[in-house]
Image: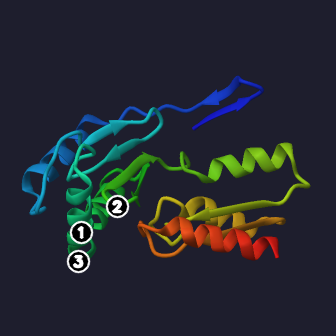
């Protein structure tokens, strides 16, 4: 949501979440059946809000416990769907093991390829992500790139896979062959 050329800021997008959204998210923390709850649930990232029921200050063990629990019950998916229905100008996608990224529609990873490809139309572009499927935070960029000439997007293993970097390395090696 920030774009620099030669260390000069070309544009920056910002987002101020509605108070009603913040109230809803606070309520979700209180009613969650999560097996663990830590602190630092909301992180303002300028053009998006990163929300985590378990909290960004959780330990690695707590993170894994929440991720396994959420994989079974789908708490983040339910919250993301509610946000999209209730605030239609916003998008909410699952990111990483514990969070949801919330931003105005269009303030996602896909905006970078449009700008970069416009400035450098004859280059080839490759994107590798762990959540390139619909509903994942890498999906908007993967979707746009799959429709563009000289662009490829790849799914690296399972979402939030601990050793996903190995899948990324494997993809890169195959591309270099």
Residue sitting nearer the eye, 2 or 81: 2
Write the residue at 28% across / 60% down: 82
> How far across and how far down the image is residue 49, in percent?
37, 41
What crowding class fits label 3: few (fewer than 14 Cα within 10 Å), some (14-19), or many (20 or more)?
A: few
First in sequence, mark 2 or 1: give its number: 1
Whether label 2 touches label 3, CB < 8 Å: no
Residue 101 lies left or right of residue 71; in this view the side is right
Label 1, secondary structure: give it: helix
Vertical comparison of 33 with 20: above or below: below
Mark nearest the camera among 2 and 3 is: 2
Query: Mark 2 vs mark 3: which is more N-terminal?
Result: 3
Quarter of the image for the C terminus: give it. Answer: bottom right
* In the displayed structure image, the side of residue 149 where residue 110 appears, left or right: left
Q: Which residue is mark 3?
A: 72
| Residue toward you, 86 or 133 | 133
* 161 relative to 42, above or below: below
Q: Nearer the viewer, residue 64 or 150?
A: 64
Give the distance between the C-alpha atoms of the residues marked 2 and 3, in whole angstroms: 13 Å
Placement of the N terminus among the 4 image quadrants: top right
Establish if 86 lies above or below 64: above
Residue identifier under label 1: 70
In the structure shown, which secondary structural element does the residue marked by tag 2 occupy? loop
x, y percent for residue 131: 49, 66
Q: Local crowd at mark 2 within 10 Å, few (<14), some, or many (≥20)? A: many
Residue at horizontal 54%, vertical 65%? Answer: 165
Kindly identify which numbered label has been placed on residue 97: 2
**Residue 173 x, y percent position in the rendering:** 73, 72
Q: Position of residue 70 (x, y in %)?
A: 24, 69
């Amino acid at each position: 949501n920030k774009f620099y050329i030669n260390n000069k800021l070309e544009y920056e997008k910002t987002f101020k979440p509605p108070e009603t959204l913040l109230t809803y998210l606070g309520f979700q923390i209180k009613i969650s059946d999560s097996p663990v709850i830590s602190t630092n649930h909301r992180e303002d990232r300028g053009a998006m809000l990163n929300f985590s029921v378990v909290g960004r200050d959780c330990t690695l063990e707590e993170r894994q416990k929440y991720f396994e629990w959420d994989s079974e019950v789908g708490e983040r998916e339910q919250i993301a769907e509610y946000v999209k229905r209730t605030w239609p100008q916003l998008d909410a996608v699952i990111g990483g093991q514990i969070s949801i990224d919330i931003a105005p529609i269009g303030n996602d990873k896909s905006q970078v390829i449009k700008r970069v490809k416009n400035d450098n139309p004859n280059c080839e572009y490759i994107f590798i992500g762990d959540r390139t499927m619909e509903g994942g935070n890498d999906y908007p960029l993967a979707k746009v790139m799959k429709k563009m000439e000289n662009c490829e997007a790849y799914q690296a293993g399972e979402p939030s896979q601990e050793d996903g970097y190995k899948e990324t390395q494997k993809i890169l090696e195959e591309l270099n062959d």
